Amino acid sequence: MTDTLLPASTPTDAPTQRHGGVLAVGLVLGGALSVQFGSAVAALLFPRTGVAGAVTLRLTISAVLLLVVCRPRLRGHDRSAWLAVGAFGLALAGMNSLFYQAIERIPLGPTVTLEVLGPLALSVFTARRLASWCWAGLALAGVALLGQGGFDRLNPAGVAFAFGAGTMWAAYIVLSARVGGRFPGADGLALALTLAALVTLPLGIADGGAVLLDPQVLAFGAALAVLASGLPYTLELLALRRMPTSTFAVLMSLGPAVATLAGWLVLRQALTASECVAIVLVIAASIGAIRVSAAVAGPRAPR
């Protein structure tokens, strides 16, 4: 009888739990590596397809794959649900387009560092605590260090595009939650990706033209869609089943460091010592802000 009253976590379960935790961390880091190395692959495509062409390839192939897998239902949704999908699709199109415009002009590591400021600002504003504003100050110090001596080395247009991508990323987070609450599974994402692909298609065709149909380019585009969308979404979904969302968010904050590694290995993009320190400061600020936000949300009932 007493055996049935044991807590769910017993000493014999500890090795299994530790193994599950290590596996979850590996899944998150694997997803981050996939996304950032996918971005490096996209940069290799730019000379042949143009930036808009690469964006169109990624979004179109990702949308087709997701439509085949999900086969979303088009009926049974009200006007507010379709408006949410429309806004989500525009956010996806804007986020990807601005991000790729940025990595064409500045190294991958600084681009992701500046982009992370969007979700970081969202976390600070939602937490509304003094500690959050302190972490925001640390992030601003990192940005100031990143632009030491002026942003000329990083290209002002590239910096502006990265900031814009960060704003779209924050909008993506908010809209993703709204769409997820109105559509089952990944149906809303599949529909939003389809809209994003259609929005970017005219510019992509104008930029890439017939090159987009070249078999080798299509193969690169398929690899980009898998690396930057399919594989990381799957790994992140599996990881979220094994760890708290707050821990997941902290690990995702390592994106700038992973991007720096991908830029160095694939694109041979070297950074100065001060730029590396700046990236570390922004990562630390992001992790700190997420922990404060998680502490604020902690007392609420789980969704």
Image: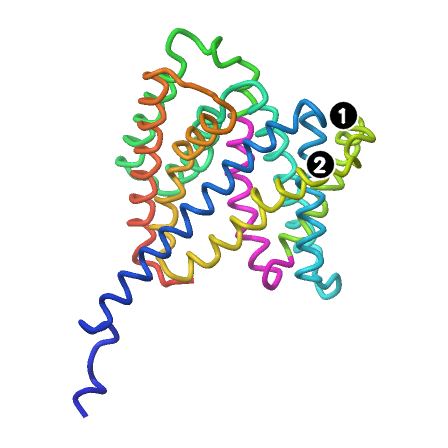
Distance, label 2 to label 1, CA atoms, is 10 Å
Residue at image point 59% right, 62% down: 185
Give, as a single range, the part of the protein colored magenta.
163-187
Q: Nearer the viewer, residue 181 or 185?
A: 185
- How packed mark 2 is, by other alpha carbons closer than 10 Å (few <14, some 14-19, many 20 or more), is many
Asked if residue 285 lies left or right of residue 270, the reply is left
Q: Amino acid at mark 1?
A: Asp
Identify the disc placed on residue 207.
1
- How packed mark 1 is, by other alpha carbons closer than 10 Å (few <14, some 14-19, many 20 or more), is some
- Tag 2–tag 1 contact (CB < 8 Å): yes
Q: Nearer the viewer, residue 32 or 166?
A: 32
Q: Nearer the viewer, residue 132 or 261?
A: 261
Principal secondary structure, stretch drawn in magenta: helix
Position above or below: 160 against 213: above
Secondary element under disc 1, as helix, strand or loop, is helix
Question: Which residue matches tag 2?
Answer: 56
Residue at image point 36% right, 26% down: 279
